[in-house]
Image (spheres, rainbow, N blue to C red):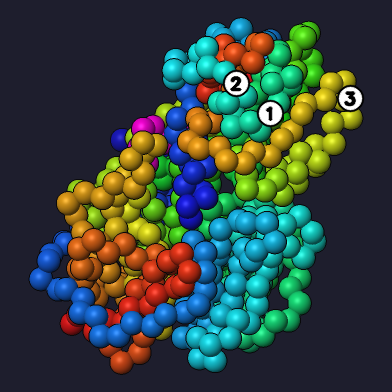
Amino acid sequence: MKNRVVLLFFFSILQACSPQENVFMEYLSGARSYDIGVQGARADSLFANNISSQALSRAVVMLTDAKCSICISSAIDLYKSFQKAETEYSLIILLDGPDRETFDYYWFRESFPDQVKDARILLASRLEDLPKGIYVVEDNETQSFSLWTGR
Amino acid sequence: MDRSVVVSLCVLFSLFFGGCSPKPKEEALSLSTSNVLVAVDTLIYPVAGAVSCSIVNDSILVAAHKQRADSAIFTVYNIRTNKLVREILYGQDEDRCLGIIYAASAEGVLLHDFVKERFALITPERLGDNSELSFHKTNIHAQCILAAKQNRLLFLNPDSFENRKRRVLFSDKECNYMQRNTPSVDTYNVVDGFLLSNKDASRFFYIDKHSGRIELYDDRLSQIKVWDVPDAPTPDYTIYKSGKHKICAFKGSIPFTFIAGSVDKSGIALVYDPCYLSVDKGFVYGDTPAYLMMFSWEGNVKTISLINAGQHPDQCHVLSEGKVSLLFCEEHVIKEVVYECAS
């Protein structure tokens, strides 16, 4: 029951939004950002060194639950949007584990036939209470944080 | 008035009123603190990491576990022989599962792997052994699915939000369900409760997990009686858009009411433990303590007993000789506390 509770709660915090042309670009622009006090923070430290500072030169990092079906579905949606986006930023999907069994099941089921850009998918360890959502990072400095609110 | 008009009106009236199904009886439940459960025994089972559990056939403890790589996601433990009978590991391989919801009925324990969209039935005679399980695909996406007679599934209709559609449905014989119309709003996450059926499936209860509502149905899926717990937490909803879809979700903190339930020959037992779940505070319990409620299959309230303050059981079980037990999923064990039944 507790897992489903997490899933239900994730739903409860989502808010209504209008469909946009490219949601990746919208998150990148910070149009949906919230101030949770991470702006300006050093990103590799924020992600507990789960991502190297080199990888964080220009990146959109989605931190998501690796067991929650809806959370995984949103990561897949963001990735689809990233494939179509014209951007120099990379996409890093950081999974809050402890494993990626459920994530891989959904991810490889998609099979992504027209793959044009790869996302880096990493399993996190030692992450403590970092809010799940989308972080925009430039030169290893956190620019914005947004909650996933749908396509 | 023309005689033919009068006759036509009479026919129309009789058709209209004859076609209406009778309204179910509605009853408010009264929570008193006069009946208090008195513990008489405690038993410990070495089953770790369980998130939900049930005792089936008085001797088999089934449990769903936290999803951990290479760990059991579902176990069956014989409490008479103190032996682990079966374990299903978490994982992507064919013989493993990624997400399990189970439900017991007279037909057996139905395991629903909602990630892989398949189910397996452990029949009552197979509960005590480790025979190979056969998984079958299903397109049913529901919070509660029971094995019913004639190889069908009985399930909670995820579109039955606020009673707008039939609460409970039967699958076809291939264990699928063809939805006639795609609903405009996906209410799967807010329509959540459990179904408890009697032995010959002539009666079953629906119990809502997020309100004080209990409903009794007959074998034609007609509602016979409903109960509401006074002052039960009530959910608030919001609708958001995801692509072309609209999804209904809980707004703010999520109320929880009925935590678990079990059946015996004479009726059902339920754990009512109202609380709210929020992001910053976790589970928050109010002034109303937990209760054990028992109902007969005929639709009568048998007893409502207070559970000692501060206790939050995960399941209940009706024993013979006028006793009931409450089950607690703890980190390393499952604890069963046996109580004298209130009269």
Front residue of B240/B59: it is: B59
User: Relative to residue B28, is residue B158 drawn left or right?
Assistant: right
- Name the spot of residue A149 as percent of width and height, x first: 54, 23
Marks 1/3: CA distance? Answer: 27 Å
Query: Label 3 sits on what residue type?
Result: Asp
Q: Amino acid at mark 2?
A: Ala
- Does A121 appear above or below A69? above
Residue B100 sits above or below residue B14 on the image: below
**Residue drawn at x 87%, y 20% as measured from the top left:** A116
Q: Earlier in the sequence, mark 2 or mark 3?
A: 2
**For discs 1 and 3, the disc positioned in front in the rendered view:** 1
Identity, as a three-letter code, of the amino acid under mark 1 = Ile
- Left of B198 or right of it: where is B67? right
For residue A114, the mark is 3
Q: In terms of depth relative to the viewer, which is nearer, A58 or B303?
A: A58
Numbered range of the magenta stretch:
B249-254
**Mark 2 belongs to chain:** A
Q: Of the numbered discs in the image, which one, if any, rests on residue A43?
A: 2
Give residue A51's mark.
1
Residue B251 location, x and y as percent? 39, 32
